[in-house]
Amino acid sequence: MYKILIIGLGGFIGAIGRYTVSGWIQRLFKIPWYPIGTLGVNFLGCLLIGLLGGLVENKGLFQPGTRLFVLVGLLGAFTTFSTFGYETFSLIRSGEFILAGVNVAAQVILGIAAVWLGYTISNLI
């Protein structure tokens, strides 16, 4: 039960963070026809999970409970691939096939690159 509660608390905070940061990025870049807020949150979330996951693996950064809270709960709720799927589907549904393809490519390529970057940075610390 402890693990579920700690993941749930992290998820609560991560979901609020996703909503806040995504909206802030969307307003900052003012691109109403592209879900830039989701892209920004996914990039940031992937960067953080790469960095922190690397530090956990290589430096023993977190105890198991903290790892569950941060990596599974907080960052699991912060990254928005369910929102990404919905927004991509909406682009396809509205006939924006090229933009949907660009969205998929950008989310996947930048996400993997950010995990690699975060992990690489963790090895330098």
Image (cartoon, rainbow, N blue to C red):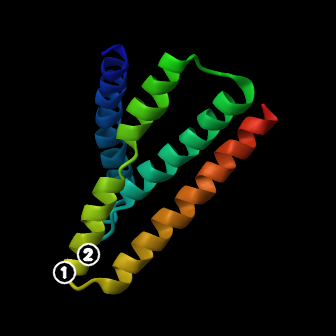
Q: Residues within 10 Å of mark 1 (few under 14, many from 20)?
A: few
Where's residue 89, x and y in %?
Answer: 25, 71
- Residue at the left extreme, as displayed: 94
Where's residue 119, x and y in %?
Answer: 68, 43
**Which corner quadrant of the image does residue 110 belong to?**
bottom right
**Which corner quadrant of the image does residue 121 belong to?**
top right
Q: Are marks 2 and 1 in contact (CB under 8 Å)?
A: yes
Q: Quadrant of the C terminus?
A: top right
- Residue at the front extreme, as displayed: 1
Nearest the viewer among 115 and 98 is 115
For image coordinates 55% across by 39% down, the residue present is 48
Relative to 21, is 13 above or below? above
Q: What amino acid is at disc 1?
A: Ser
Q: Which residue is mark 2?
A: 91
Mark identifier at residue 109: none
Where's residue 92, x and y in %?
Answer: 25, 79
Nearest the viewer among 39 and 51 is 51
Which secondary structure lies at badge 1?
Answer: loop
Q: How many marks?
A: 2
Q: What amino acid is at disc 2?
A: Leu
Which secondary structure lies at badge 2?
Answer: helix
For image coordinates 37% across by 19% down, the residue present is 3
- Residue at the right extreme, as displayed: 124
Q: Which residue is mark 1?
A: 94
Nearest the viewer among 22 and 90 is 90
Relative to 66, is 114 above or below? below
- Residue at the top extreme, as displayed: 2
- Marks 2 and 1, Cα distance to the nearest angstrom? 5 Å
For image coordinates 65% across by 22% down, the residue present is 61
Q: Is residue 67 left or right of residue 54?
A: left
**Which corner quadrant of the image does residue 83 belong to?**
bottom left
Where's residue 117, x and y in %?
Answer: 68, 50
